[in-house]
Every structure is written in structure tokens, then in C-alpha cells.
Image (tube, rainbow, N blue to C red):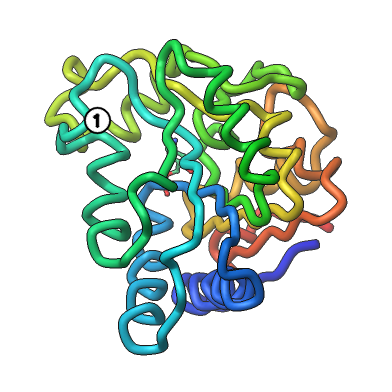
Amino acid sequence: MIAVHRTAEEAEAAVTSVLIETIARKADAVLGLATGKTMIGIYHRLVRAHRHGGLPLARATTFNLDEYCDIAPDHPGAFRTYMRHHFFAKTNIDPSRIHFPAEGGEAAFERAIRIAGGIDLQLLGIGRNGHIGFNEPGSSLTSRTRKVHLTPMTREANAEDFGSLERTPTHAMTMGIATILDARRVILLATGAHKRHALADAVDGPVRAGNPASALQRHPNALIVCDSAAAAGIEV
Ligand code: GLP
């Protein structure tokens, strides 16, 4: 299922509505969260719904898709910093219910997801090379949470968060593709012309490790939401 909106703002609003509906329906919802520029508008809207609309977040549990290796948790480029700044510090989410994949804690992270009852809704972005989380092209579609090597394209796309390419981490921890596909529902948000090739490949192309996002074709309850710029390459 794919929903194409005229603008990124409309696409963000649509995804936020699904998140709000999920949380409103199940106060102890288990949410898989993503980072990146694409998601900033989502967290802004969720904070507004929490502060002005009473969206209940105190009993929600979160599992972030990924985090860089070999940097301090409070490093400006860390996804922990991103999530604290854009979302966690602005809501009443219980810090004990927040989870990030950590080196040496792969099994514990997967176990925590199972103990939480599984992920109700997994939010995803997509990298320019079709990665989801930090599952880079070539990642096994049966992969689980693990440490991965980042491609030069991914490091270049994220270098601005570290001041230079040299200071950008070469490795990261990521939820695996199988871990993502275990979520009861998956929603992928893609906006901007720079995502059109990766999205077209994910939607029109065969399911293949070369485009990890194509794995969503195998998910029974996956929704792709995009703006017209990101949808420009889609044939179907
Ligand atoms: C990073 C993250 C992904 C994210 C992607 C796109 O690599 N690991 O989870 O989807 O970049 O980010 P952006 O939204 O900034 O294009």
C-alpha cells in the first residue's frame, strides 16, 4: 500500500495521524522509532499533540532502529541526542521504556522487544541507497539486530552531524530486517526528490538484498507514505 501526498508536510501529517491513532487506541503502545531529517516534522507534530491534545505517552515503550558505534551517547550526532532533543525531552515518556540497540546488547534488545509484546508500529525512513535503519544494501532479509559497517554514501549523507566525513562513524548498531518485519505494522515515510530512486526500487523492483526497503513488499501490513517528489520514479 502506498499513499502519495502533494507535499512533504501533508505526508508528515498523514504519518503522524497513524501514530496518534495507534497510541490513542493503545496507551501502552510499543513503537519502533526512526531518526533523520525526514522524521523531525513527525516528532514536532507528536509533541504538539501531546502538549496541546493530551496524547498519552507515559506508558508507551519505544525501540529506536539504530545508533552509531564508538561515540558518546550525548554526542551531538548521536541518535540518542536527536531523539532527546526532538521528542523524549519534550514528552513524559518513561526513560526506562526507551531502548536503543547497543554493541554487545543485541540479544538483550531483541529480548526486550519480545518481552514488550512485539512492536505495534514501526516507523521507517529510507536512505538514498534504499537502506532501512542502518541495514545497508546487501543486508540479509533475515537479519537481526547487529553491528554493521556504514557505506561511504551513508557516511557522506550523515557527515554534517559530525562536522566532517573523517569524524563520521564507520559502524553502527541496527535493528535487523527480520526484526523490522516482525512489527505488526510498518509505515515508511519518504519525502524529497533525492529519495525517488530508492523508493522506486523498493516499490517496483524485486525483493532483493540490494534494496533493503524492498523487504516491505513481504510485510502484510506495510504502508509507504511519500510526497510527489519522492514518488516521481514509481511506475506502478
Ligand atoms: C539514516 C538513518 C535511517 C534514515 C536515513 C534517512 O541513515 N539510519 O534510519 O531513514 O538516514 O535519513 P533522512 O531522513 O535524513 O534522509
181 to the left or right of 170 = right
Residue 221: % across, % down: 81, 56
User: Residue 53: x and y, percent?
Assistant: 41, 88
- Asked whether the viewer can see residue 83, the reply is yes
Q: Position of residue 29 (x, y in %)?
A: 59, 60
Task: Residue 5: tell me if it is visible.
Answer: no
Q: Secondary structure at mark 1?
A: helix
Work out which residue is located at the far bottom of the displayed protein and give it: 52
* Residue shown at 69% from the left, 23% from the top: 210
Quarter occupied by the C terminus: bottom right
In the displayed structure image, the side of residue 206 where residue 77 appears, left or right? left
Residue under label 1, please give it: 159
Q: Nearer the viewer, residue 125 or 113?
A: 113
Query: Vertical placement of 215 versus 40: above or below?
Result: above
Q: On the picture, is 50 further left or further right than 26?
A: left
Residue 207 percent location from the top left of the image = 82, 32
In this view, the residue in front, 143 or 108, is 108
Decide: is 10 above or below 222.
below
Image quadrant of residue 101?
top left
The quarter of the picture showing ligand 1:
top left
The three-letter code of the residue at mark 1 reads Ala
